[in-house]
Image (tube, rainbow, N blue to C red):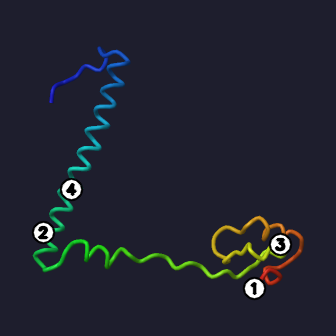
Amino acid sequence: MPDIDLNTLSLAELKQLEKNVAKAIASFEVRRKAEARAAAEAVAKEHGFALGDLVDATSSRKSASSVPKYRHPENPEITWSGRGRKPAWIVEGLDAAKSLEDFAI
């Protein structure tokens, strides 16, 4: 690899060099992924499977949707499962001396 004296380059040349390096890195990663995929497909084929069959079987797990446990007192369309951050209407109700049981479905 040739040595480049970065101190002698103009700002435009440095920016172009930066773009070229970013493209080279992205291209390198794409090539490496393609090589890894080809190797994985070869191993799967040796065992009599297609890679897609193995990947689909293990990565198709999706998180189950949460069942709502609490309902907005004025708008029954708005619900909360009790998971994650409390919605503003729950926080406001709790600040107004209500309990979570007051919002329970």
| Mark 3 vs mark 1, CA separation in Å | 16 Å
Task: State the CA–CA distance, disc 2 to disc 3.
Answer: 58 Å
| 70 is higher (above) or lower (below) than 18 | below
In the rendered view, does 73 fall on the left or right side of 40? right
- The amino acid on which the numbered mark 1 sits, given as a three-letter code, is Ile
Residues tagged 2 and 3 counted as in contact (Cβ below 8 A): no
Image quadrant holding the C terminus, namely: bottom right
Quadrant hosting residue 12: top left
Q: Which residue is mark 1?
A: 105
In this rendering, which labeled residue sits more in front, label 2 or label 3?
2
Q: Residues within 10 Å of mark 3 (few under 14, many from 20)?
A: some
The residue under label 4 is: 34
Q: Residue at x 77, y 64 (%)?
A: 88
Q: Which residue is mark 3?
A: 94
Quote the CA–CA distance across marks 1 and 4. 50 Å
Residue at screen point 32% across, 20% down: 13
Quarter of the figure with residue 91: bottom right
Q: Could you tell me if the residues under marks 1 and 2 are in contact, i.e. CB atoms within 8 Å?
A: no
Q: Determine whether the residue tagged by mark 1 lies in a helix, strand or loop.
A: loop
Q: Which residue carries the number 2 mark? A: 42
Q: Earlier in the sequence, mark 2 or mark 3?
A: 2
Say which label, 3 or 4, has the lower sequence index. Answer: 4
